[in-house]
């Protein structure tokens, strides 16, 4: 499933296979990296001539897109780049970074804090969450987290406009005012069973699972991640689990309900690189900073839709956006 691996992998099972994966090298399907020339605010960035940098990503659209953005920028600044995007799963991508098979990739603060560093509870403030991950991962693993983007690709629940108008729901707190029979949910199996997933969310919002006054078991439907969006749009359930920068939200005209009690973790994305690479080439921070600042939820929704809905190649989408924003010529 696309984002299940991003959130919490089955760590014991996955890590047991990592020595084999690492020993054989990373078998990714990175594809090609378009050639470009830096422009605008990046035109005066110190050159990376002589640098050899391997860039990784996980194997879902947004992660590959971000990896391609980094590759295009680094290559345009003179680096010799190796495309190792499309690594299957968070645990594998993380292990590749820890074992220096990749030098740089984009990562999510919530994933770093909970999945990689092993904390049980997220930090609600976005900046504090980033700072905590940055400091601990540097101290423990010599990994440098550069300042994060404003985008926050976290969990959410979406409804159609018809459901929103019928029941007047704008936030997750409003679900308790919906008749019990209409509190129907489409989720993926991992999210439905993990302690910080559906059960905790329903309890937080006063509609616990299994309660006659909450959400009866019969109201829950399990789908593969990608199928949830279409099932919600077609009315098979009223509330569908989504990821908040998924392009299918825009394509299917779904409305994401506000997480007004801030139950879900923050998943702001940052460039993460090895300390050795950043010590040798500190100009990487200047190269990616202006681009990172432009990565909002709205931007990622539109770019992801071009990949997931229109079927475009992530490298082409990345190159076109960087050009439109004036970062490359």
Image (spheres, rainbow, N blue to C red):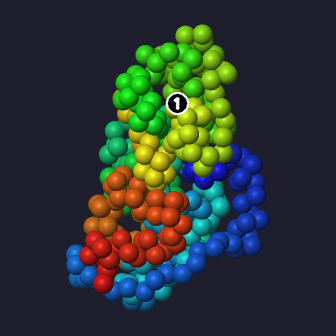
Q: Residue 177 placed where, x, y %?
A: 43, 16
- Does residue 201 appear anywhere in the picture? yes
Q: Quadrant of residue 45?
A: bottom left
Query: Looking at the image, which is closer to me, 161 or 285?
Result: 161
Q: Residue 239 placed where, x, y %?
A: 52, 32
Taking the view exactly as shown, the residue that stands out farthest to the top is 212
Viewport quadrant of the C terminus:
bottom left
Q: Secondary structure at mark 1?
A: loop
Q: Residue 15 placed where, x, y %?
A: 71, 54
Q: Residues within 10 Å of mark 1 (few under 14, many from 20)?
A: many
Query: Looking at the image, which is closer to me, 34 or 263?
Result: 34
For the point 54% across and 66% down, the residue is: 311
- Does residue 4 appear anywhere in the picture? no
- Residue that numbered label 1 is attached to: 238
Q: Residue 196 placed where, x, y %?
A: 55, 32
For the point 62% across and 65% down, the residue is: 87
For the point 74% across and 73% down, the residue is: 24
Would you say 271 lies left or right of 47 here? Answer: right
């Amino acid at each position: 499933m696309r984002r299940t691996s991003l959130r919490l992998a089955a760590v014991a099972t996955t890590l047991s296979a990592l020595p084999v994966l690492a020993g054989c090298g990373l078998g990714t399907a990175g594809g090609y990296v378009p050639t470009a020339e830096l422009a605008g605010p990046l035109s005066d960035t110190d050159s990376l001539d002589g640098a050899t940098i391997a860039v990784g990503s996980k194997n879902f659209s947004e992660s590959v897109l971000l990896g391609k953005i980094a590759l295009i920028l680094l290559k345009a600044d003179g680096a010799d780049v190796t495309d190792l995007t499309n690594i299957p799963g968070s645990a594998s991508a993380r292990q590749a970074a820890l074992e220096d098979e990749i030098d740089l990739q984009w990562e999510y603060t919530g994933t770093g804090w909970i999945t990689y560093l092993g904390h049980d509870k997220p930090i609600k403030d976005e900046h504090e969450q980033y700072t905590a991950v940055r400091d601990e991962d540097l101290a423990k693993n010599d990994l440098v987290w550069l300042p994060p983007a404003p985008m926050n690709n976290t969990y959410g629940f979406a409804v159609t406009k018809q459901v929103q108008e019928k029941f007047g729901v704008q936030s997750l707190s409003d679900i308790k005012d919906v008749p019990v029979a209409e509190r129907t949910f489409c989720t993926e199996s991992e999210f439905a069973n993990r302690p910080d997933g559906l059960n905790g969310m329903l309890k937080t919002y006063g509609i616990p699972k299994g309660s006659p006054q909450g959400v009866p078991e019969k109201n829950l439907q399990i789908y593969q991640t990608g199928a949830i969006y279409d099932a919600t749009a077609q009315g098979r359930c009223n509330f569908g689990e989504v990821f908040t920068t998924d392009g299918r939200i825009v394509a299917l005209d779904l409305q994401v309900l506000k997480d007004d009690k801030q139950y879900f973790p923050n998943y702001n994305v940052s460039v993460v690189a090895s300390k050795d690479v950043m010590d040798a080439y500190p100009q990487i921070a200047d190269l990616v900073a202006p681009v990172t600042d432009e990565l909002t939820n709205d931007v990622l929704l539109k770019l992801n839709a071009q990949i997931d809905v229109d079927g475009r190649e992530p490298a082409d989408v990345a190159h076109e956006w960087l050009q439109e924003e004036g970062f490359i010529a």
